[in-house]
Amino acid sequence: MFTKLTELMKDESGATAIEYGLIAGLVSVAAITALSAMGDDLEAMFNKVSTELKSATGTTP
C-alpha cells in the first residue's frame, strides 16, 4: 500500500498534462488578443479596397 502511494506521488504525468493545458490556454489568449487588435485595421483596409475597386469600375458604393 505504501509503495503504491509513493509511486503515485512520484508520477508526474498529470502535472505535465496540466502544464500543456496552461500553455495551450496562454497561446489561445495571445492569439485572440492579437486578432482582436488587428480586426479593426483589417476591416478598414478591406473597406477601402472595396471602395477603390467600386470607383475604378464605375459602380456606386
Image: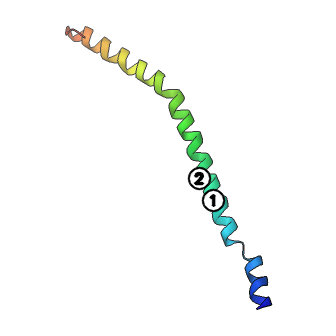
- The answer to which of 36 and 1 lies nearer the viewer is 1
Residue at the spot 69% in from the left edge and 66% down from the top edge? 15
Q: Is residue 53 left or right of residue 10?
A: left
x and y percentages locating residue 46 in the rendered image? 37, 21
Q: Amino acid at mark 2?
A: Ala
For label 2, the SS is: helix
Q: Secondary structure at mark 1?
A: helix
Q: Looking at the image, is 16 positioned above or below residue 27?
A: below
| Residue 13 rendering spot, x and y as whole percentages | 67, 72
> Percent position (x, y) of residue 44?
42, 18
Q: Are discs 1 and 2 less than 8 Å apart at CB?
A: yes
Find residue 48 and report its image quarter: top left
Task: Name the residue located 21 percent from the left edge and 8 percent from the top edge.
Answer: 60
**Would you say 2 lies left or right of 39 here?**
right
Check the image and name the residue furthest to the bottom.
Answer: 1
Give residue 59's position: percent from left, percent from top: 19, 10
Question: Quick one: label 2, few (<14), some, or many (20+) residues within 10 Å?
Answer: few
For the point 44% across and 24% down, which residue is it? 42
Quadrant including the N terminus: bottom right
Read off the residue under disc 2: 24
Residue 20: give its label: 1
Give the side of residue 2 with respect to residue 22, left or right: right
- Three-letter code for the amino acid on which mark 1 is drawn: Tyr
Q: Residues within 10 Å of mark 1 (few under 14, many from 20)?
A: few
In the displayed structure, 50 sits above or below 23; it is above
The picture quadrant where one finds residue 3 is bottom right
Q: Which mark is residue 31?
A: none
> Which residue is situated farthest in the front direction here?
1
